[in-house]
Image (cartoon, rainbow, N blue to C red):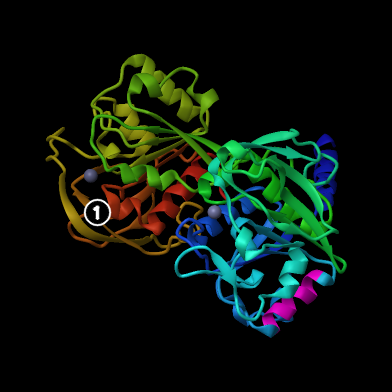
């Protein structure tokens, strides 16, 4: 009964969650090496998407846009300084904003051809022929006399917020920018300035409070401009991150629901807590890339059994990834790892860790179901390896839909092949190879169906670590081992 009430409550909460704000970024040109759209566009896209509030798309060739291109979106982020787009595309943008939608711009859009200025060959600015895009200046609520374009040298300065606007409400009234302070602009009378900064004459400034952020109405639409955002270092200031994301939400919807402080990169929500265990064997640092970029995984690292296998490990971790190479564990460490497995926690064993703990029979016989024999043992010869072999594996018959191999398909990577390993007859093979240099099982589940222990043989070096199929396989394995299969 309680569960069903909880379910209803969760359904009501998710039904109340607002739909994502649809953002279209218009980019593809920037004027200087500092304002590099190739670098800043993915950064700002990641910031917006990391909040979970936005759905973002990017156009890198905006001159062909039409009303139909823009129709699905709530707000445009014009991140561009280059040639005009032509009458049809520019009219489509004006009509879009005027109809009640939003536009956000930052920093270097306030000069260039749109604004009717251009760089003189010998330095400085001059009026561009044709006068620029009048509607763009009207939307931004600003223009810049070519003789006045400039800024104080980049420095750290305080930005003061007008906390009465939805974008700034709830934020600290002052934040630190590390940026260029643009000055001597001509602002349209109808704009609302929501942030200013004192332009210190001792640092080449005007001695006045210069507008740093403002909003403007354009028809029924809303625009926001921030003169901040010179480069990624400038954008990484907490005040920039929060005002930018909140401004995009405001311009797109008229309201702000985002918090006053926005973490970037966004912290994973309810992630699988993973402990990587290494030590005793060298490896390429590309190994860490296997675990990066997943919002549902948070990992940390132990380099010794003493550090990894502690009595409280089942409380601290949901899954352990073994990439170590050890002969033995002490009794306390064994009890901890065994307790972890028996508590239903996940253990993903990778590559050379198949040679782990040979003197601990329970481990390789009951838990993992496989062992690479470093030396002849119990009448069996030692196993063999060979590096740099293309190893093709495919899902075993009837196993392509298993959560661990789902979406992986056939996988080929240059890797190390192993032959002559011991395998339990009770393992469940998920992927296998026909390569005669390798034993057939490449990915398998351990003998005990109650436990979440599995082995993935791939993973010797960069060729495997950077393979998207391998990354997917390991990610799947972590989620499955932690009981989070999708
Ligand atoms: Zn700049
Ligand atoms: Zn290896």
Most extreme residue toward the right is: 220
Q: Quadrant of ligand 1?
A: bottom right
Name the residue: 39% across, 46% down.
Answer: 289
The image shows residue 258 at horizontal and vertical percentages of 75, 45
The image shows residue 474 at horizontal and vertical percentages of 42, 48
Name the residue: 29% across, 44% down.
Answer: 351
Name the residue: 30% across, 21% down.
Answer: 329
Q: Which residue is mark 1?
A: 415
Residue 155 higher or lower than 444, as above or below: above
Q: Quadrant of residue 22?
A: bottom right
Return the residue nearer the eye: 53 or 426: 53
The answer to whether residue 312 of the structure is visible from this angle is: yes
> Is residue 314 on the magenta stretch?
no
Report whether the residue tagged 1 is closer than 8 Å to ligand 2.
yes
> Is residue 90 on the magenta stretch?
yes
Q: Which residues are magenta?
A: 88-97
Mark 1: secondary structure: strand
The answer to whether residue 20 of the structure is visible from this angle is: no
Residue 379 higher or lower than 137, as above or below: above
Residue 317 horizontal side relative to residue 95, left or right: left
Return the residue nearer the eye: 424 or 261: 261
Q: For label 1, count other residues whose C-alpha is less than 10 Å away and answer few (under 14), some (14-19) or many (20+).
A: many
The rendered magenta stretch, by its main secondary structure, is classed as helix
Query: Which quarter of the figure is the N terminus placed in?
Result: top right
The image shows residue 464 at horizontal and vertical percentages of 31, 53
Name the residue: 23% across, 26% down.
Answer: 327
């Amino acid at each position: 009964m309680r569960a069903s009430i909880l379910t209803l409550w969760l359904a009501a909460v998710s039904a109340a969650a607002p739909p994502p704000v649809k953002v279209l970024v218009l980019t593809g040109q920037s004027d200087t090496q500092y304002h590099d759209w190739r670098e800043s566009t993915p950064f700002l896209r990641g910031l917006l998407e990391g909040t979970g509030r936005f759905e973002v798309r990017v156009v890198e060739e905006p001159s062909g846009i039409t009303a139909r291109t823009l129709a699905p979106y709530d707000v445009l982020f014009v991140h561009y300084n280059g040639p005009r787009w032509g009458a049809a595309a520019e009219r489509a943008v004006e009509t879009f904003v005027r109809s009640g939608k939003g536009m956000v711009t930052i920093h270097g859009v306030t000069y260039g051809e749109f604004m009717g200025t251009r760089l003189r060959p010998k330095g400085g600015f001059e009026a561009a022929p044709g006068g620029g895009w009048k509607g763009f200046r009207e939307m931004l609520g600003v223009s810049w006399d070519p003789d006045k374009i400039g800024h104080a040298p980049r420095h750290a300065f305080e930005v003061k917020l007008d906390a009465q606007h939805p974008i700034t409400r709830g934020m600290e009234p002052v934040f630190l920018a590390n940026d260029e302070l643009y000055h001597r602009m001509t602002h349209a009378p109808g704009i609302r300035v929501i942030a200013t900064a004192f332009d210190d004459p001792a640092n080449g400034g005007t001695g006045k409070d210069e507008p740093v952020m403002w909003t403007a109405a354009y028809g029924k639409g809303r625009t926001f401009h921030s003169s901040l955002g010179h480069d990624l270092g400038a954008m990484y200031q907490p005040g920039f991150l929060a005002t930018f994301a909140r401004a995009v939400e405001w311009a797109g919807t008229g309201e702000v629901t985002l918090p006053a402080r926005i973490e970037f990169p966004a912290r994973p929500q309810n992630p699988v807590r993973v402990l990587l265990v290494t030590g005793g064997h060298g490896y390429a640092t590309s190994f860490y890339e296997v675990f990066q970029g997943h919002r549902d995984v948070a990992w940390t690292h132990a380099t010794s059994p003493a550090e990894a296998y502690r009595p409280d490990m089942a409380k601290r971790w949901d899954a352990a990834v073994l990439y170590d190479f050890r002969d033995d564990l002490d009794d306390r460490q064994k009890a901890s790892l065994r307790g972890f497995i028996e508590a239903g926690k996940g253990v993903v064993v990778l590559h050379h860790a198949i040679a782990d703990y040979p003197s601990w029979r329970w481990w390789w016989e009951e838990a993992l179901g496989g062992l690479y024999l470093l030396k002849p043992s119990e009448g069996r010869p030692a196993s063999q390896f060979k590096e740099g072999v293309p190893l093709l594996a495919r899902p075993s018959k009837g196993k392509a839909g298993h959560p661990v191999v789902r979406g992986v398909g056939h996988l080929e990577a240059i890797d190390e092949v192993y032959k002559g390993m011991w395998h339990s007859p009770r393992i469940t093979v998920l992927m296998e190879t026909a390569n005669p240099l390798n034993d057939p099982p490449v990915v398998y589940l351990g003998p005990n169906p109650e436990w979440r222990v599995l082995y993935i043989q791939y993973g010797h070096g960069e060729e495997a670590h950077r393979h998207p199929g391998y990354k997917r396989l390991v990610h799947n394995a972590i989620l499955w081992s932690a009981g989070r299969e999708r």
